[in-house]
Image (spheres, rainbow, N blue to C red):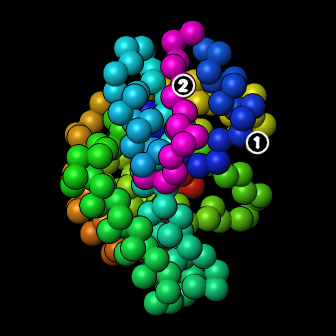
Amino acid sequence: MVALAGHAPEALLAAVGRSMNVVLVRPDDSAEGIEAAAGALRRAAGISSAYVLVAADPLAGVAAAWRAMWEIPREASRDQRGDEEFELRAAEALTAWRAGQFELPDYYLVLAEQTGPGQDPPPDFYLGPLRSVRPHRVTVAAAAEPAEQAAEVLTALGSLRHGRWWPSLDEIFRTSRGFYPGSLAESGTGLATGLSA
């Protein structure tokens, strides 16, 4: 089971959904946030297919709050409101996870934003702290057009590698609290661009 992270245009979802070995699971329209994503993950868990792609993520709120902490003008020093929003979203996700409402998907497939030459990619929860704890469980599809991105998604699905299972959500959030986005670029790893596997 693979969760899509990032904005997924309808054209991309339709193109991927036409693949014969991929089943696309969308969240139920009657639910929102963690509840909708958890429901989609539960439905996906009962499907037998080569690839089950879930167009929802229970950590989406956490990821958005983490990114907001690091966006300009907070890049140099995070402000208290950003930290509080992250902690609120993390507590909500942790409560739902501990209550057994969801388990993390086998993999995350990040739909990366395109940046121009010389531009740094924006801070990303999935490609930063999440990928740092389990590099083999987070992969990337980057392309500008939905048709190209659909091809990238299918290629990424076919190249998923095995690795250790996720640590506890508590550990992931502890890593997130101490993770500085610039540390990837400073380390010189391919994770800085988010485009290497």
Looking at the image, which residue is at 39% across and 73% down? 88
> Mark 2 or 1 closer to N-term?
2
Q: Nearer the viewer, residue 171 or 100?
A: 100
The percent coordinates of residue 123 (x first, y second) are: 55, 66
Q: Is residue 154 left or right of residue 161?
A: right
Mainly helix, strand or loop, the magenta region?
A: loop
> On screen, 51 above or below 30?
above
Q: Quadrant of the N terminus?
A: top left
Q: Is residue 18 left or right of residue 1?
A: right
Distance, label 2 to label 1, CA atoms, is: 21 Å
- The answer to whether residue 172 of the structure is visible from this angle is no
> On screen, 95 above or below 165?
below
The residue indicated by pointer 2 is 24
At label 1, which amino acid type do we have?
Answer: Ala
Per the image, label 1 sits on a secondary structure element best described as loop
The residue indicated by pointer 1 is 144
Q: Nearer the viewer, residue 78 or 152?
A: 78
The percent coordinates of residue 180 (x first, y second) are: 43, 74
Looking at the image, which residue is at 76% across and 59% down? 117
Highlighted magenta segment, given as a residue range: 20-34
> On screen, 72 above or below 44?
below
